[in-house]
């Protein structure tokens, strides 16, 4: 095998696989990237047995062939080469790969390509074609609510599924950790046979990295066991989480009558500031709403106490309610409007949060007991 590659294009492709490759693995080949030059195209592939990424890259094929080499090593070398430089890759022997660029000359160890576990890229189902930027927004609006509790593995991802709301079809994404929930949806122009799946967290974050760079049409195909994403010359295939996502609709409040409208920037900066006095991991915060004044209070035995006031628009009864401040900050990070809408019922019931600029997203937070 012998190839000529542009350093910048090669580096971009290698960067896509870094989060997938298992650097510490009992199977050595899984730490490698597969380079293949055949049928007039160059592809690079990587897998951890749960996820596989296959990307076609531009370059000149001087001699066809294939090999595998350590993904981290070749990525580091290419990253440190000058931008715009040309790279010549050739396989001298079955166990050695030559990488030459200008006055740089490296010999990399290889493993046989026949040992690389290639997953079939066929996923049964109808392909859903949507804008990559719209789907990226869907993921960003929900990913922070994913659970890290491995004992409830079915919450360790985003639930992607079709919904029919008020005679409109949507692709909806939901994530929850049992203390908070985020849902976002995008309009479907036509009905498609899309299998409901739970997208694993690792797959999600690798996909987000790709979609941040690729603004084009995204094709999604889902089956009961796998999901495939295709955009431009990149294909990402992943196993889905084997489990049943809970009926989240039961926890979305429908009768919260106390309505708080607060300036987002002022609210989040105040929370961040007063939270400096909180030494506990949850950043426990107390909100007291009276007429058009919102008081934020922190009382920490080891650090001290503090109170700040914000002028806001409020309709409802006097209210005292506690929150994990991180949850409020996380939601604030995805609100697009200048204001945040908070709908509360009482100190112990779930709170509903809306973004006035985004009717297709909502957030639910369970309050905390505070003195």
Image: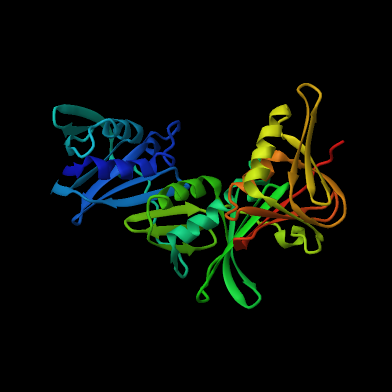
Residue at the spot 23% in from the left edge and 37% down from the top edge: 83
Where residue 143 appears, as percent x and y from the top left, is 58, 49
Where residue 114 appears, as percent x and y from the top left, is 30, 44
Residue at the spot 17% in from the left edge and 27% down from the top edge: 104
Residue 266 visible in rendering: yes
Direction from residue 279 to residue 233 in the image, left or right: left
Quarter of the image for residue 278 reads: top right
In front here: 238 or 144?
Answer: 144
In front here: 347 or 35?
Answer: 347
Where residue 304 appears, as percent x and y from the top left, is 78, 24
Task: Please determine whether, in this image, residue 225 is positioned above or below residue 151.
Answer: below
In front here: 146 or 52?
Answer: 146
Residue at the spot 37% in from the left edge and 54% down from the top edge: 214
Where residue 106 appears, as percent x and y from the top left, is 20, 28
Residue 1 visible in rendering: no
Q: Residue furthest top?
A: 302
Residue at the spot 58% in from the left edge and 50% down from the top edge: 334
Task: Please determine whether, in this image, residue 92 is positioned above or below residue 169.
Answer: above
Q: Quadrant of the N terminus?
A: top left
Direction from residue 132 to residue 261 in the image, left or right: right
Quarter of the image for residue 317 reads: bottom right
Q: Quadrant of the C terminus?
A: top right
Instruction: Tell how many labels.
Output: 0
Q: How is the image coloured?
A: rainbow
In front here: 53 or 121?
Answer: 53
């Amino acid at each position: 095998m012998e190839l000529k590659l542009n350093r910048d294009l090669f580096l971009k492709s290698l960067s896509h696989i870094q989060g997938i490759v298992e650097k510490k693995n009992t199977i050595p080949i899984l730490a490698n990237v597969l380079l293949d030059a055949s049928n007039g195209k160059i592809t690079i592939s990587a897998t951890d047995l749960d996820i596989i990424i296959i990307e076609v890259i531009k370059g000149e094929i001087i001699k066809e062939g294939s090999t595998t080499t350590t993904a981290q090593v070749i990525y580091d070398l290419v990253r440190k080469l000058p931008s715009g430089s040309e790279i010549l890759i050739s396989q001298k022997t079955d166990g050695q790969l030559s990488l030459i660029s200008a006055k740089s000359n490296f010999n990399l160890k290889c493993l046989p390509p026949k040992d690389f576990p290639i997953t079939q890229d066929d996923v049964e189902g109808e392909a859903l074609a949507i804008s990559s930027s719209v789907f990226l927004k869907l993921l960003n609006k929900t990913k922070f609510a994913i659970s890290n509790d491995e004992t409830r593995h079915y919450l360790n991802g985003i639930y992607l599924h079709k919904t029919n709301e008020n005679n409109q079809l949507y692709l909806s994404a939901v994530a929850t950790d049992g203390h908070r929930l985020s849902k976002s949806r995008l309009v479907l122009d036509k009905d498609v046979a899309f299998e409901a799946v739970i997208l694993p967290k690792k797959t999600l974050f690798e996909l987000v990295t790709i979609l941040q760079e690729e603004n084009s049409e995204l094709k999604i195909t889902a089956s009961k066991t796998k999901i495939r994403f295709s955009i431009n010359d990149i294909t990402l295939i992943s196993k889905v989480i084997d489990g049943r996502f809970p009926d989240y609709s039961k926890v979305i409040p429908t009768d919260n009558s106390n309505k708080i409208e607060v300036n987002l920037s002022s609210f989040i900066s105040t929370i961040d500031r007063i939270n400096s006095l909180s030494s506990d991991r949850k950043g426990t915060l107390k909100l007291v709403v009276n007429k058009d004044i919102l008081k934020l209070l922190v009382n920490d035995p080891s650090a001290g106490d503090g109170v700040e006031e914000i002028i806001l628009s409020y309709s409802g009864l006097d209210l005292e309610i506690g929150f994990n401040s991180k949850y409020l900050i996380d939601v604030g990070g995805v609100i697009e409007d200048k204001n945040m809408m908070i709908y509360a019922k009482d100190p112990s019931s779930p709170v509903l949060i809306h973004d006035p600029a985004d009717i297709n997203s909502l957030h639910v937070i369970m309050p905390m007991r505070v003195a």
